[in-house]
Image (cartoon, grey):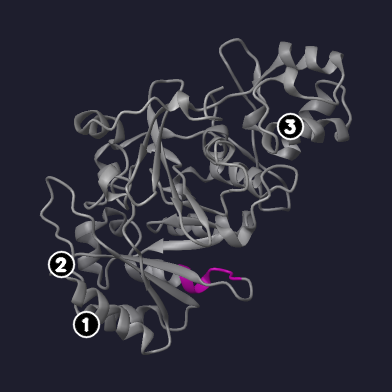
Amino acid sequence: MDDAMNDTPGTGKRRSRPQTDDRGRVDLKSMDRATLERFLVDDLGQTVNRARTVFQWIWQRGARNFDEMEGISKHLKRLLKERCTLSFLEPALVLRSVDGTVKYVWSLEDGHQIESVLIPEETRMTLCMSSQVGCAMACTFCLTGDLGLKRHLTVAEIANQALQVGRQLPEGERITNLVLMGMGEPLHNLPNLVPALDICLDDFAMKFSHRRVTVSTVGLVPKMGELAAALPVNLAVSINATTEEQRRQIMPITRRHSLEELVQACRDFPLPSGKRITFEYVMFRGFNDTLDDAARLFTLLEGIPTKVNLIPYNENPGRDLKSPLDADVKAFQHYFVSRGTACHVRTTRGIDISAACGQLGKGKEQAIARGWLEDARRIAGLSQ
């Protein structure tokens, strides 16, 4: 499968390139709406309106095959069956936390696995999505980094996470927020991320508001501007340190793009009125959890429309890093709040199923070891 994309001239957007299976059939889920319309018009001789009907059946109604699509001719259905296919993620298992968090482990066509995490709250339902198999960033505190980068996810593999989880929710419930904070560095896979999120935002597809979609990065500075040019989504920056030396110890990307360079890129990031950059700050005991750290971070971010999310580290085996003390987290938060900067402490969710921040990537092995295995095909709406 070819992950390369083409830019649409003058728009800053990336146009998805259709992918084919081993029989040469085009996966319609690999296309954003503009690409699908062009394919159906130019290659299959259809109208734009007919192409939009097909697109809606795929992404709004979750059609599992072409026979389910009403309102299109038998001739078009025959063409679609001959020339096209609809890909799905294969549900491997579902893990449910005592706090209501749900982790989905998906098997891909090549045998790799990825994970998505559904986080229900009183006023919203957030899906944390993956963008890569593994990750090349090698942050010392993150289990996903242990895997290394296996490959980028395709357009369909990213967008299908939102579609397939959304389709299995009880009637009356829906995903309200998407966060690209799962496995992988989203901006490292920007050519596939942009068309996938275009599908999520499209009024003829999943209709998510751009205000409820957030893309996180460890600091791939050159790609931040590309994201802003392509999509009006929210940006979250995983900063996690207040000095160059400190950040280099835990985030190797700092050797390529310095902390100073990253902060300047945030200052230059074009923010629409009313939007802020979220700075994620994972706190480690005795490393970056002092009031001196708080003061340095406050100074670094001064002048940037900012929201700070403090994330107490979730301890992982084989690492010397420790969770911070509650008192230190509260003092850190108070430093920002007392100076008029929004600062929240992220509640740890799904820790009992290894679904918390920094714990994704080893779900199947952990589930089997702890007896959490559940037949995901029994979950309505996930199997084809």
Compare residues 340 and 121 and report the one nearer the observer: 121
Foreground mark, 1 or 3, reads 3
- Spot occupied by residue 366 in the image (x, y as percentages of width and height): 23, 34
Q: Which residue is mark 2?
A: 285
In the rendered view, does 50 fall on the left or right side of 158?
Answer: right
- Spot occupied by residue 310 in the image (x, y as percentages of width and height): 32, 69
CA–CA distance in space, label 2 to label 1: 12 Å
In the rendered view, does 55 fall on the left or right side of 165?
Answer: right
Q: What residue do we see at 79% from left, 16% from top?
A: 77
In the rendered view, does 16 fall on the left or right side of 111?
Answer: right
Q: Which mark is residue 291?
A: 1
Q: Residues within 10 Å of mark 3 (few under 14, many from 20)?
A: many
Compare residues 377 and 244 and report the one nearer the observer: 377
Q: Residues within 10 Å of mark 2 (few under 14, many from 20)?
A: some
Q: What residue do we see at 30% from left, 85% from top?
A: 335
Q: Is residue 89 above or below residue 132?
A: above
Q: Earlier in the sequence, mark 2 or mark 1?
A: 2
Q: Amino acid at mark 3?
A: Trp
Marks 2/3 in contact by CB < 8 Å: the verdict is: no
CA–CA distance in space, label 1 to label 3: 54 Å
Q: Earlier in the sequence, mark 2 or mark 3?
A: 3
For residue 56, which quarter of the picture? top right
Determine the secondary structure under disc 3.
Answer: helix
CA–CA distance in space, label 2 to label 3: 50 Å
Q: What residue do we see at 35% from left, 52% from top?
A: 99
Q: Which residue is mark 3?
A: 57
The part of the chain drawn in magenta is 265-271
Q: Amino acid at mark 1?
A: Leu
Marks 1/3 in contact by CB < 8 Å: the verdict is: no
Q: Earlier in the sequence, mark 1 or mark 3?
A: 3
